[in-house]
Image: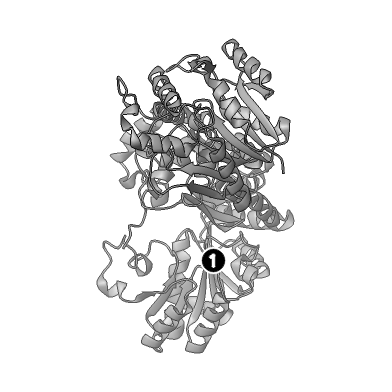
Amino acid sequence: MKTGIVLQARNGSTRFPYKMVADINGRKSIEWLLKRLEKVKVNERIVATSWKEEDRDILKIAEYHNWKTLAGDPEDVLSRYAKAVEDFSLDVVVRITGDCPLIDPELVQKALSKALEEDVDYLVLTGIIDGFDVEVIKGEWILRAHQKAKLPSEREHVSPYIRKSKKAKKLFYKIHEEDLSHIHLSLDYPEDLVIIERIIKILGKEDFTYEEVVKLIKEKPEILKREKEIPVNEGYLKSLRQDKDFIRSLRAKPLKLENSLRHFEKTKTLIPNCSQTFSKSYLQFSVGAVPLFVKEGKGCYLTDLDENTYIDYTMGLGACILGYAFEPVIERVEKELRRGTVFTLPSYLETELAELLRETIPCCEMARFGKNGSDVTSAGVRLARAYTGRKYIACCGYHGWQDWYIGTTTRDRGIPEEVKSLTLSFEYNNIQSLERLFEEYKNQIACVIMEPVGVEEPKEDFLQKVRELTQKHGALLIFDEVVSGFRFSLGGAQEYFGVVPDLACFGKAMGNGMPISAIVGRSEIMELFEEVFFSFTFGGETASIVSAIATIQYLRDKKVIPYLWEQGKRLKQSIQKLIEDKEMEDIAFVKGYDVRFLLDFVGENSLKLKTLFQQECAKRGILFTGSHNMALPHDDKIVEKTLEVYDEVFDIVKFAVEYDMVDELIEGQILQPVFRKM
């Protein structure tokens, strides 16, 4: 193992210019360091200074005393240390700063020995007098910091990145119990020179120790008296102020949003919530910082009213799995539009789609169509009640806007208590919570309706146990696959997990953006639709039906879904790696499956962090909502661009949290939850 002292020194101090060559009792300040540090047992002794003309004398003095030298960036001290590690193949670096002419070689040796003994990545002496500072750092961590540290303080003061890292094995080494760090004996100001000279003269020798200095100060505290008080840690505090300026500079230029904001003011007077969907409304997008309305979409790009374009991953809430305005589907729809879309009689296309669904979905023997997910989930509930003669519903997940479900949420205004009481909720991955419902409402539960998967993975055969419970208690099992259908596999999550329900509901990706949904299931149950009323004018509208046929066939024939898993895996794993590399696990997380996952933030300020992330992503051309619904146009180029943007924006969020600047950096309205906490 190769060890080395790297002494950083320069003459360009604004507080004390040319302090390295200042005279201390007949010897230049840096020479005190060089001579005293010669006694430390290391393989290399290196002086790292800047390439400026004013620092040439430092190089000459170091070389005269047989120290090796290197010159580098005047401000980026970390880069000098990295160069020393690389040029001299150092495994362990003892970092000494040039403002410590009183440095004690015994203390340095003790710190180095302790670091090697404990095999730590970083060691610093704590509680000692300022001016005897020693840090011992593994070379690999200096190189890592050089690669990843970005803040001015991290570049100038070398070790902050390492000290903050949760991955570095650190030792804050106390050599005495008493904290003496308030005593200032480093050479930062001309006034310090007087005190240092005074101490050396009183001690009367060159090979004094740290203990002797401590003893002297305790016996004669008056020797520390200065003609004027000096600021403590002024240099470091200055670099922290520079950090904040640097963080502010990371924000991109605000978007031009004049048309969007004008349209917003107009829309507020015409459309409650300014949207037909809560999750598309201004509650979910930062007013003043990101777009609120779309003009058009193509592939995975959206264009707003101000002609800004964005990469999109929400993809119409997961509906546009092949991309916006996907030509092979559009061609079929346009052809159908010219033939008419709603007739006095059913279209033959309804049978064609039903047959395709039966070939594709494991539980499908018969099918009926709707326009939204809520249509078919509500149809499923009504059908289950008719089939079983029971009135209670057990649900888990999100199932749409209808009374029977929305009454279980905080958006329950207008729902009678009598209706609310008929729907019972249970917890995902908690089979006991469902067992308790069946026990409490014995022979009264018509069905269990649930999303088979969201962003949480089913554990311990949860879905199979739900299937067994429903069969045991005579209730129907309905899978709400409005989100998971045609995404996890062509036959939905039921095919992916191998658990077949009695009924299932599909929508979203089924028609690639056209309004169509389906309820499918066993014939003996579905045949009750002969009597159960489920009927509306546009249920057989042919443009949407042909869109579904074209979409499903394309997904099947071109094997799109395996590609989505592949692209999603790359994106999700890379985002997770960014979070881990930046040590942001306590700030952000990724959750879900490769084909559909969520990037979100942690803690009571999570919505503020999401707002800031959304703001800076939008400026860089990504419309961020947290959801990542992988779609066909999310190719390698799109994924790469996304990762570049996330890399930049993660830094902003991380630094904003570290420096308590989140509120300052947010330029728009803070996002609001669709459902409030109960």
Image: 228 above or below 549: above
Residue 463 shows in this picture: yes
In this figure, what is the number of numbered marks? 1
Image: 7 above or below 337: above
* Quadrant holding the C terminus: bottom left
Image point 27% across, 61% down: which residue? 413
Name which residue type carries label 1.
Answer: Val
* Quadrant holding the N terminus: top right
Mark 1 residue element: loop
The front one of 366 and 657 is: 657
Residue 246 at x, y percent in the picture: 46, 28
Image: 34 above or below 444: above
Residue 182 at x, y percent in the picture: 36, 36
Image point 66% across, 65% down: which residue? 356
The front one of 119 and 653 is: 119
Q: Quadrant of residue 187?
A: top left
Label 1 Cα neighbours within 10 Å, binned few <14 / some 14-19 / many ≥20: many
Residue that carries the numbered disc 1 in the rendered image: 453
Residue 443 at x, y percent in the picture: 41, 89
In this view, the residue farthest toward the front is 204
In this view, the residue farthest toward the top is 53
Applied colour scheme: one colour
The front one of 346 and 145 is: 145
Q: Is residue 438 left or right of residue 629?
A: left
Residue 333 shows in this picture: no
Residue 622 at x, y percent in the picture: 53, 38
